[in-house]
Amino acid sequence: MSYEKVTQAKSRLIIGTKQSLKAMKNGEICDVFIADDADRKITQEVIEMAGELSIPCHYVDSKKKLGRACGIEVHAATVSIRKP
């Protein structure tokens, strides 16, 4: 289900931890997706900020599949969806 949601929101995706954090601080995000196989040192700040801002945080099993769902050739640890 989560991969489908990412694929359907391609025009509103923010890919990457740093970009997601910046957009979250600006109030632009409605959902966050975290790959379970990503290094927690990389994703922990996003997870904490999503909790503080009450942004739904969805977990997927693979950063490779998450990157593919975004239409990119590389892995993605964190992906956010911009508010419509």
Image (cartoon, rainbow, N blue to C red):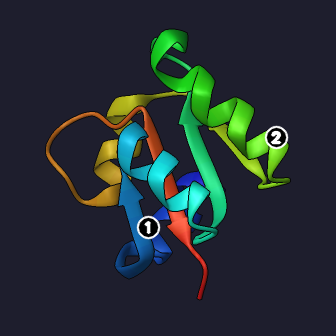
Vertical arrangement, residue 32 with respect to residue 47, above or below: below
Nearer to us in this view, 66 or 23: 23
Query: What separation in Å lies between label 2 and label 1 (alpha carbons)?
Result: 24 Å
Q: Position of residue 70 (x, y in %)?
A: 33, 58
Dot label at residue 45: none
Residue beneath the point at 68% across and 32% down: 47
Q: Quadrant of residue 51?
A: top right
Answer whether residue 49 is visible to the viewer in this image. Answer: yes
Q: Which residue is found at the position 39% from the left and 60% from the top? A: 14
Kind of element beneath mark 1: helix
Q: Quadrant of residue 67?
A: top left
* The N terminus, quarter of image: bottom right
Above or below, 28 relative to 33: below
How many tags in the picture?
2
- Report x, y in % for residue 64: 32, 32
Provide residue 12's location: percent of width, then percent of height: 43, 77
Cβ–Cβ below 8 Å for labels 2 and 1?
no
Question: Does residue 4 appear anywhere in the picture?
Answer: no
Q: Which residue is mark 2?
A: 51
Residue 28 position (above or below residue 62): below
Q: Which residue is mark 1?
A: 7
- Residue nearest the viewer, comparing 21 with 81: 21
